Image (tube, helix red, strand yellow):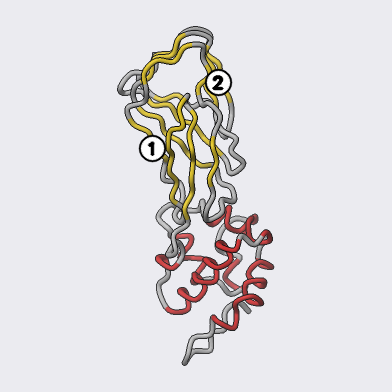
């Protein structure tokens, strides 16, 4: 009986229960998924009785602005009775919004949305805003060279503080201080941004020209 929390994997994985599984109204099943559509699975050899909460959580990965995937069954059992009282997707990103819709048989349609202000809402001034617009354009275009950057940026601090830090530290002298070494490797992506969008970044009356 689950009256607390069960998570099949630390990252995507599978948990097997030999016997029955009953989830109470206070119980929570946590299931992770990634951009390829791989997800946690709970396998039960006996009867399943459901109540409580299903909480889905996105693994850090590259999700396009119109990402969507249909899962397989999150619960595999010969008999499943009842339904979750609440289904939600954990807020793990400062820039992406995820949703889940039932397709029956404990299968779910997962979608991600990157709103038009995903990065600009974290800008503090006009220069930050110009960088944010460049990031938005790169993300919406799905530029392959930039996907590693976004998989880190989109799953940085959920309060958006690290996005703000990137916007204010976009020059190479400050960019390396943004995050971990995995993000530092992507300075060449910011050069790509300059080449593709730099002419539109200059702000009237300033000497700031985008990425140096």
Left or right: 89 with respect to 172? Answer: left
Whether 40 is drawn above or below 132: the answer is above
- The residue lying at 45 percent from left, 9 percent from top is 47
Quadrant in the picture for residue 99? top left
Residue 155 is tagged as none
- Residue 184 in view in this figure: no
Helix, strand or loop at disc 2? strand
Whether 172 is drawn above or below 53: the answer is below
Whether 108 is drawn above or below 5: the answer is below
- The residue lying at 44 percent from left, 64 percent from top is 116
Left or right: 66 with respect to 88? Answer: right
- The residue lying at 52 percent from left, 35 percent from top is 32
Task: From the top left corner, tell me how far across and down residue 64 is, in percent.
Answer: 56, 54
Mark count:
2
Task: From the top left corner, tell me how far across and down residue 149 is, in percent.
Answer: 61, 58
Q: Which residue is mark 1?
A: 88
Quadrant in the picture for residue 6? top left
Quadrant in the picture for residue 122? bottom left
Task: From the top left corner, tell me how far across and down residue 39 is, in percent.
Answer: 56, 33
Whether 176 is drawn above or below 89: the answer is below
Image quadrant in which the C terminus is located:
bottom right
Rounded to the nearest whole Å, what is the CA distance between mark 1 and mark 2?
Answer: 21 Å
Tag 2 or tag 1, which sits nearer the N-term?
A: 2
- The residue lying at 45 percent from left, 30 percent from top is 30
Task: From the top left corner, tell me how far across and down residue 197 is, in percent.
Answer: 60, 77
Q: In this orientation, which residue lies closer to the viewer: 178 or 43? A: 43
Image quadrant in which the N terminus is located:
top left
Q: Badge 2, how many Cα within 10 Å: few under 14, some, many 20+? A: some
Helix, strand or loop at disc 1? strand
Q: Which residue is mark 2?
A: 15
């Amino acid at each position: 009986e689950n009256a607390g929390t069960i998570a099949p994997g630390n990252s995507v994985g599978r948990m097997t229960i030999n016997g029955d599984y009953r989830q109470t109204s206070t119980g929570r099943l946590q299931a992770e998924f990634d951009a390829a559509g791989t997800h946690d699975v709970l396998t039960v050899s006996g009867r399943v009785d459901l109540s409580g909460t299903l909480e889905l959580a996105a693994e850090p990965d590259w999700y396009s602005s119109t990402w969507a995937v249909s899962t397989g069954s999150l619960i595999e059992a010969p008999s499943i009775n009842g339904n979750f009282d609440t289904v939600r997707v954990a807020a793990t990103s400062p820039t992406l919004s995820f949703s889940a819709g039932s397709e029956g048989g404990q299968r779910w349609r997962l979608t991600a949305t990157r709103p038009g202000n995903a990065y600009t809402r974290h800008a503090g001034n006009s220069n930050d805003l110009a960088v944010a617009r460049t990031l938005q354009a790169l993300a919406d275009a799905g530029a392959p060279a930039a996907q590693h950057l976004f998989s880190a940026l989109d799953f940085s601090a959920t309060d958006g503080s690290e996005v703000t830090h990137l916007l204010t530290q976009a020059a190479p002298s400050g960019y390396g201080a943004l995050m971990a070494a995995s993000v530092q490797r992507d300075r060449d992506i910011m050069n790509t941004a300059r080449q593709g969008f730099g002419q539109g970044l200059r702000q009237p009356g300033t000497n700031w020209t985008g990425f140096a």
